[in-house]
Amino acid sequence: MTRALVLGGGLSGVLAAVALSRHVDEVTVIEGDRLPDGPRPRRGLPQGQQAHMLMAGGAQALDQLLPGTTARLYAAGAHRLTMAGHILTLSGEGWFERFDHDAYLISCSRHLIDHVVRQLAFRDDSITVIESTKVIALTGDAKRVTGARVEHQGGEERTISADFVVDATGSRSRAPQWLADLGLPQVREEFLDAGLAYAGRWYEAPAEAADGLPAVLIQPEPRSGRPGYGAGLLPQEDGKWIVPLIGTRGGQPPTDGDGFLEFARGVRHPLVADLIATARPIGEIRASRGLANRRRLYDRLPVPEGFLAIGDSATVLSPNYATGMSLAALGALSLRTRLKNHGLTPGLSRQVQSDIAKLATGPWRTAIGNDRWFPGVKTNMKLGGGGFQRWFASRWMKTAAVDPKLLAATYEVATLRASQSSMMSLPMLTTVLRGPRRGPLTAAEALARFPEFDELLAAVAESAAAERVTG
Ligand SMILES: Cc1cc2nc3c(=O)[nH]c(=O)nc-3n(C[C@H](O)[C@H](O)[C@H](O)COP(=O)(O)OP(=O)(O)OC[C@H]3O[C@@H](n4cnc5c(N)ncnc54)[C@H](O)[C@@H]3O)c2cc1C
């Protein structure tokens, strides 16, 4: 009988269990937390209260692993938003044009995504979850991992043996230490920390927005020399909005009610502040700090047989790029593909670890290439001068902002439907070098392309006036 052990029952862990389930007799997931039986918050997923956008590439991978996932999300009220048509974006290099293009993201609560994934995954009887149990060590030696040492809530410890062990314990994974304890060299880690922090609040949208509203993303400017300030508004299920405020070192958003509104009004455009003035806040403002880019270079280790690190345990990207869940799904998909082709054979760990590293390379480069310019960045990487790269990235975005063809290609990459190399064609590079064909959109021009916002603000003002008359 063959057994796989998955450490951590978050999104990566559950998806890895799904990928493994057809290729071993049983999969055991060890989770330190208790998993709720509905779309509800839990202690082990503190970021679950913040805005989570699921990129198209990740959504497609989820459907391949668990057919019907996105259909269930939509049925539960998730929104499919095309980047070009349903999101008003103020990028670091100006307002983006509105046009018709299919690159999309799914907007709903993180809790709904995890709940639907768990519902579908745990229909498989070969997957068992042991909750309230912490992994404390790996067993085996430097050549092969053979299981894990776990501690149940009451303090009882035991060893669980397995033919394959997946670490999916997230960004604070202790796997580097556990592997070092087995005699492996310390895994190299790279980080770049712009001091990014989130403050997030949920709102009940006004009745006038019942037919839906486009989303707003006001992104922080990485190359201005000032801290980055951003704000967003994303429609969620059940007529709710989630509003993330974002700031980098020296400009982190506050978590008190007045400070939150003031920050929203002070970002580069006050639209988010105007919109939330029409809505009713629900619950507290939640903060998330310490949101650095961090990757552990497991693929450069002499990877032991029977071990794999997946999801945030391998690469954590600044949430600004909204790629973590998608990389988790794409990583699990590459595990499934390798298992389909070769089964649990020697070399599997090395191959999948290398696939996972490659999947994250493009998003990592994008994140580092932007975040390195925020003031006060801390990093252990040698980044070089970057003068040309800085000029080119800025030129690219300025051109794309008013060139739908170039912006569509950028969106394909941002939503993980295409690789970065797809943007390196001669016609595209020529377009960028030639630069924008017209001046940037003004705020008034960009807003005129999304009349839904003005219409909502006018309708709410009208209802309030009518109420004053009748009241
Ligand atoms: C503020 C914020 C906003 C984000 N926004 C987005 C977004 O818009 N889009 C997007 O795609 N991604 C986003 N992300 C990233 C996303 O949250 C992560 O990439 C994703 O949760 C990674 O899943 P994971 O399963 O690898 O790790 P986690 O979700 O961290 O799960 C790890 C699991 O392991 C368990 N665990 C930990 N240690 C142990 C142990 N010793 N023993 C047993 N169990 C253990 C934990 O309880 C948890 O259940 C955001 C992140 C943050 C912080």
Image (cartoon, rainbow, N blue to C red):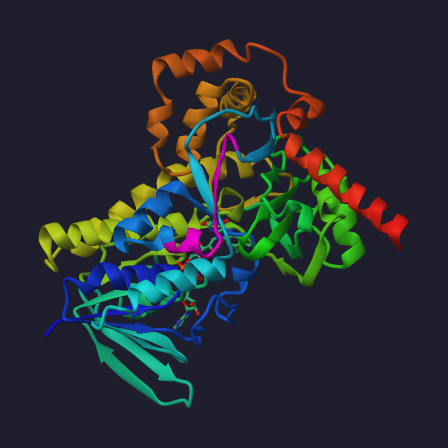
- Residue depicted at 75% across the width and 44% down the height: 460
Is 366 a magenta residue?
no
Question: Quarter of the picture for ligand 1?
Answer: bottom left
Quarter of the view holding residue 183: bottom left
Q: Is residue 45 left or right of residue 95?
A: left
Q: From this viewpoint, which residue is outermost toward the front? A: 470
Q: Nearer the viewer, residue 280 or 121?
A: 280
Q: Is residue 146 left or right of residue 331?
A: left
Q: Nearer the viewer, residue 216 or 219?
A: 216
Above or below 315: residue 265? above
Res 128 seen here: yes
Q: Quadrant of the N terminus?
A: bottom left
Res 248 seen here: no
Q: How many marks?
A: 0
- Residue depicted at 49% across the width and 9% down the height: 434
Task: Give the x, y percent position of residue 140.
Answer: 21, 72
Q: Which segment did they paint magenta?
A: 72-85
Q: Quadrant of the C terminus?
A: bottom right
Task: Give the x, y percent position of residue 149.
Answer: 30, 79
Quarter of the view holding residue 10: bottom left
- Residue depicted at 48% across the width and 24% down the height: 407
- Residue depicted at 45% across the width and 73% down the height: 36
Task: Give the x, y percent position of residue 105.
Answer: 45, 42
Task: Give the x, y percent position of residue 18.
Answer: 25, 61
Above or below 122: residue 101? above
